[in-house]
Image (cartoon, rainbow, N blue to C red):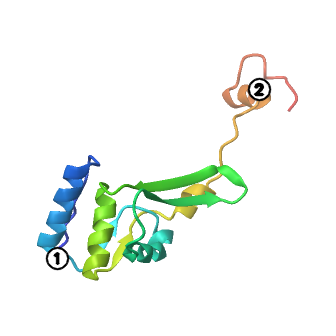
């Protein structure tokens, strides 16, 4: 078994074309793309010829609009080209990153209030202060 990693630094037509050419040369058994594994089931939608980029994956916490992440795909995105290559060739394609639920579920740290700041760094004059 061999593993090929195709890193893409710039998103553009040249990168997308090169990636597609390399996938055709390699004929992989599976394609893994950086993205949330919760979206694996959505890859099937890329088989629909009516689905045309730009498209995006969106993960969010209901009721908390500030907790959201998205993964955009344009026709010139290497990720989109990898997905299209895989679905056209009948190759399994999966996302391989930490689940979006992990990062979206992380608690935001609240900034320390003035009383906590002084107590934490032992500000002068706090020695006899009641908590």
Q: Is residue 66 above or below residue 129?
A: below
Cα separation, mark 2 vs mark 1, equals: 60 Å
Of circles 2 and 1, which is in front? 1
Tell me the quadrant of the picture where the N terminus can be found. Answer: bottom left
Looking at the image, which residue is at 32% across and 55% down?
A: 77
Looking at the image, which residue is at 22% across and 63% down?
A: 5
Name the spot of residue 126 as percent of width and height, x first. Answer: 78, 22
Looking at the image, which residue is at 85% across and 24% down?
A: 129
Of 67 and 74, which appears nearest the observer?
74
Name the residue at the top extreme: 125
Q: Earlier in the sequence, mark 2 or mark 1?
A: 1
Name the residue at the front extreme: 50
Name the spot of residue 17 as percent of width and height, x first. Answer: 19, 58
Of 16 and 69, which appears nearest the observer?
16
Name the residue at the left extreme: 25
Which residue is label 1 attached to?
A: 27
Q: Is residue 72 left or right of residue 17?
A: right
Which type of secondary structure does the marked residue at label 1 adopt?
Answer: loop
Name the residue at the right extreme: 130
Of 121 and 43, which appears nearest the observer?
43
Count of picture labels: 2
In the drawing, what numbered circle is on residue 114?
2
Looking at the image, which residue is at 85% across and 32% down?
A: 131
Is any atom of residue 107 visible in this view? Answer: yes
Write down the quadrant of residue 51 in the picture: bottom left
- Badge 2 vs badge 1, beta-carbon distance below 8 Å: no
Q: Is residue 76 left or right of residue 53?
A: left
Name the spot of residue 79 as percent of width and height, x first. Answer: 32, 61
């Amino acid at each position: 078994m061999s593993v090929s990693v195709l890193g893409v630094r710039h998103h553009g037509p040249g990168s997308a074309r090169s990636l597609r050419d390399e996938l055709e040369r390699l004929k992989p058994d599976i394609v893994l793309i950086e993205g949330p594994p919760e979206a694996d089931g959505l890859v099937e939608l890329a088989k629909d010829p009516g689905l045309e980029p730009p498209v995006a994956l969106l993960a969010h916490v209901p009721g908390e609009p500030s907790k959201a992440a998205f993964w955009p795909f344009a026709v010139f995105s290497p990720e989109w080209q990898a997905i299209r290559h895989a679905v056209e060739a009948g190759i399994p394609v999966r996302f391989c990153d930490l689940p979006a639920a992990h990062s979206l579920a992380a608690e935001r740290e609240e900034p320390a209030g003035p009383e906590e700041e002084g107590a934490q760094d032992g500000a002068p004059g706090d020695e006899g202060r009641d908590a």
